[in-house]
Amino acid sequence: MRATIGYRAVDETSPLEPWNFERRELRDDDVAVRVTYCGVCHTDLHSTRTPGDFPIVPGHEFVGEVTDMGSRVTDFAVGDAVAVGNIVDSCGSCDMCAAGQENFCREFPTLTYGGHDRHDGSITRGAYSDEYVVRDRFVYHRPENLDPAGVAPLMCAGITVWEPLRRWNVGPGVRLGVAGIGGLGHLAVKLGRALGAEVTVFTTSATKAADATELGAHHVVVSTDTEDLESRAGTLDLIIDCIPVDHDLAPYLRSLALDGTLCTVGYLGSTTVDFLDLLVGRKSLASAGSGGRRYTQELLDFCGENGIVADVETMPSAQVNEALNRLAINDVRYRFVLDMSDLDTRTM
């Protein structure tokens, strides 16, 4: 077994603490990755602060370097710059996996943490740690021209918005709306603009208008301004809704043009929809989550070619609890990333 140091939550009320644990020995198709940066996602906050199966080592959007590999690995070499997201395995044989949508695996994908290993049934431990061992199919080549800390959130927030952008063929001539400009939304704006779309941002705060414009938005709508919101009726082809809490979908559905689509990727709980808001204009309500292997590598390649990374605040991993506490009150612009270089097995 491989000695590893990381941070664990022992229950939903205690701060994360250092923990020495073991990774599996390399299988033939495994890659060992020295974790250099790991993003802090709302999923991490939720999983460590609600009742569940503890202990938990969070972290599912990370970058690093290959340090070792199994005997059958051919796509990577020691020293390669790589990235890993929130899926580390799938059945590989169902219709979803065959379509390159391992995120929708019929047998459920193996999650980077809190999942069950498909070989031995052990619980997966995340990348708030110095090393991760992962099946080679779920390791991605990382553009070395990009800031590695800024790449880490692409593996969760980035791919979450990239898949709908590609599914609905966003490009020149497409009128794209983005609701909310947090961790997900700010990347949707950057990517949509780089794809050539005309981008409109919906925000509840007039003070964020300048931020939205700086990110690349052509238009900004303050959603608390009823007149401004109503003036956008029928003007957009696709809206990616990144708002992470329950909210009224009606104003966004009404902002869609004929055959437009509202894709919700922020709040995934129960909600209510008036079907007349769908009927008038033959509109669609859709959702998406995470991404498959094909789109994930495509996203990284696109970001490398266009110089796109997340806007991040990087903190030493020892400040992980401060990052989670600030995330809980939305005190971040737009993603925290932990620098894992301060982890040292000799002193912890």
Image: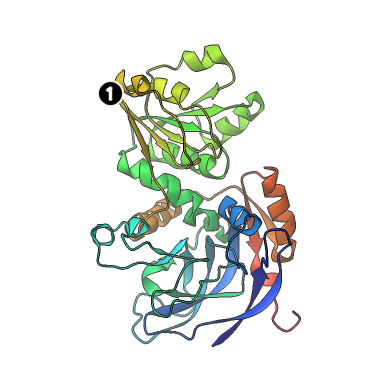
Report the residue at 47% width, 73% height from top. Answer: 80
Residue 262 at x, y percent in the picture: 39, 32
Report the residue at 41% width, 16% height from top. Answer: 233
Report the residue at 56% width, 45% height from top. Answer: 183
Whether 158 is drawn above or below 165: the answer is below
Residue 159 at x, y percent in the picture: 43, 51
Whether 7 is drawn above or below 162: the answer is below
Task: Identify which amino acid the numbered label 1 is placed on.
Answer: Arg
On the image, which quarter does residue 288 sit in?
A: top left
Whether 119 is drawn above or below 15: the answer is below
Residue tagged by mark 1? 282
Which residue is at the front of the view, 312 or 94? 94
Q: Quadrant of the C terminus?
A: bottom right
Q: Residues within 10 Å of mark 1 (few under 14, many from 20)?
A: some
Residue 346 at x, y percent in the picture: 73, 84
Residue 307 visible (yes or no): no
Whether residue 195 sits left or right of residue 81 in the image: it is: left
The colour scheme used here is rainbow
Report the residue at 63% width, 57% height from top. Answer: 337
Secondary structure at badge 1 equals loop
